[in-house]
Amino acid sequence: MNIKVTQEFLSKALKIPNEGNKLFFNSWFNDVGVIRNQLILECTKPDHDFNSTNLQDVPKILHNIIWHTLLPRCGTFDVVTDTDLCIIYHLMTKTKLNLCFVILKYTSDSCLTIKQKVEGKLLPFLRLPKYHLKEKTLSTPS
């Protein structure tokens, strides 16, 4: 069975428009004409290091929304990624960003990263259960 999730599907399911800038990787700064260091200075409290703890109020609230809702992840909460900055920038400037595109790219990128770690034996202790579609059962490898 193949399951295909497209931008159009996400748009309908989440009831959000499938339009706006399709930006994801570090190149978004150049594509929009934003200087990364300048944006970091604008988002961070004066004379503080760049991390989520030291973001100014509005970027900090937006980062929490991104972290917990749009692009959930685990690990340290201090990291503000370039993708986070992209979404924060677009929200603060009221510029359209195609969230369906960003969510799909983020999800596929996360899946590939996990797959590469497992296949590269960086996580040899991880044994993923298999789901059998015909029997509709879950089996754990021994």
Image: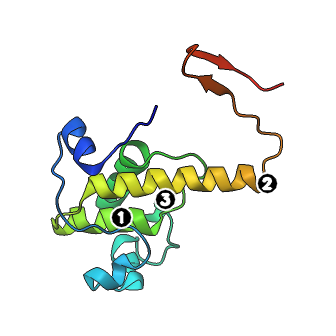
Number of callouts: 3
> Residues under labels 3 and 1: Cα distance?
9 Å
In the picture of the structure, the residue carrying the numbered disc 1 is 56
> Of tags 1 and 2, which is closer to the observer?
2
Visible residue check, residue 39: no
First-in-chain label (1 vs 2): 1
Q: Which mark is residue 18?
A: none
In percent of width and height, residue 74 lies at: 57, 45
Q: Amino acid at mark 3?
A: Thr
Label 3 packing within 10 angstroms: few (<14), some (14-19), many (20+): some
Snapshot quadrant of residue 141: top right
Secondary structure beneath label 1: loop
The residue under the point 67% across, 56% down is: 116
Separation of residues labelled 1 and 2 (CA atoms) = 37 Å
- Residue toward you, 110 or 39: 110
Residue 17 point in image, percent of width and height: 15, 50
Picture quarter with the C terminus: top right
CB under 8 Å between discs 1 and 2:
no
Left or right: where does residue 96 sit relative to residue 73? left
Residue linked to disc 2: 122
Would you place residue 91 above or below residue 71 in this image?
A: below
The one of 67 and 52 positioned closer to us in this rendering: 67
Does residue 62 show up? yes
Position of residue 78 relative to residue 40, above or below, is: above
Amino acid type at image mark 1: Gln
| Numbered disc 3: secondary structure | helix
**Residue 109, above or below 5:** below
Q: Can you identify the residue that label 3 sits on?
A: 53
Task: Name the residue at 57% across, 55% down.
Answer: 112
Q: Residue at x 29, y 59 (%)?
A: 58
Mark 1 Cα shell of 10 Å, populated few (<14), some (14-19), many (≥20): some
Residue type, numbered disc 2: Leu
